[in-house]
Amino acid sequence: MAAILIDDVTPGVRITHDVFTTQGNLLFPKGKTVMPKDIEILRAFLIEEINNGKSPKEELSAPPVESNALNEIGAKVKAIQKVLSFEKDYEKMITLLKNVFRNVAVTEIPVLELRIQMEKLLQYSREYNILTFYPKSINKQDYWYHNAVLTGLTSYKIAHWLGLPVNEGMQVAFAGLFHDIGNAKIDLDILQKPSKLTASEVEEIRRHTMYGYELLKNVKGISEGVRLAALQHHEKVDGSGYPLRLQADQIHIYAKIVGVADIFHAMTLSKTYSQAQSPYLVLEQIDSEAFGKLDPKIVTTFISKVTQFHNGTMVRLSNGLIGEIIFSDRSHPTRPLVSVDGTIYNLIENHQLFIQEIIKRKEVLQKS
């Protein structure tokens, strides 16, 4: 087996054998064209050589030159148009949901209208990136509506990742959309109180689960799983949740899914009583509850999927530096390698450092 030293590998060549870390995780797949930052990654993982079945000249070859600039531009334009359409339909759903929350006590829930709008949003499932999407126009008073819509979209994706039947997708999305509908019966002064709640106020807040079930009990067009998600999304698999202290299999699968999605968005959105937290730190907190409070299969699937395709994402670290994610280890998906002006920060080794927020390239240009 021929060995190619890392010092002999130059940008622009292709690797024809998978490259693994010392932990057995795939670092680069075969056929990958090596870029300058890839060589940095290899060195960061202390990989000194690449083993191949043939000689270096046979194994590494320059990639064919293709002129596809126009196709790339066209694809980018279409992608931007889809994102803009998604944002427009998202805002329509927020407006619609506000009316539902405000009038739920006196009028019927317009399930058909909500379904039509949700179907429009789900058409953009690929454009909706759970980890990086943040509403363009959001104020802290509207937190509940954004949390509902985002939890619906995220629950839909989790259900798909778990392999739930396709025909249950809309009902899972509804479960997320309606999970906090019971808050419509809670005093706004309590819901939006910026200071610490009293014991009686906490008890009233917890009643939103039962209020939600009651509001949805006779609504047509939704399944019992949607109603149970409203009732059970704060239950924990160890029986420590509320309102019924259910355990494990006593909790409906929709409620388990919504419970994970709700925690993520509740912690990554700004509210009147707390600031948005780093999505990567939130994922770590969710992961810490995977074997006790939350369903471990759902948590593992969720974290694995949302962190899977983020190489190239621009982030701000907790030390204020702006860099680019260049590699994510599947064993530590919330602690990738981040390159800052050529310096690589290994967040697996540096536990004090973490990703504070995901930022857009436009913001990076403004800061520079």
Image: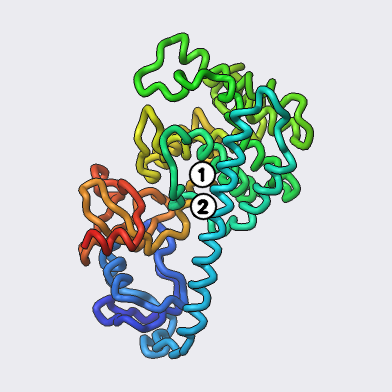
Left or right: where does residue 149 sit relative to residue 217?
A: left
Nearest to the eye among marks 1 and 2: give it: 2
Mark number displayed over residue 305: 2
Q: Quadrant of residue 178?
A: top right
> Could you tell me the amino acid type at mark 2?
Lys
Residue drawn 64% across and 50% down?
160
- The quarter of the picture where the N terminus appears is bottom left
Q: CA distance from mark 1 to mark 2?
A: 9 Å
Left or right: where does residue 148 sit relative to residue 282?
A: right
**Total tally of numbered discs in the picture:** 2
Most foreground residue, 173 or 352: 173
Residue 358 at x, y percent in the picture = 36, 52
Mark number displayed over residue 300: 1
Examine the rendered structure and indicate whether residue 172 appears above or below residue 67: above
Residue 316 at x, y percent in the picture = 28, 52
Q: Residues within 10 Å of mark 2 (few under 14, many from 20)?
A: some
- The quarter of the picture where the C terminus appears is bottom left
Name the element at disc 2.
helix
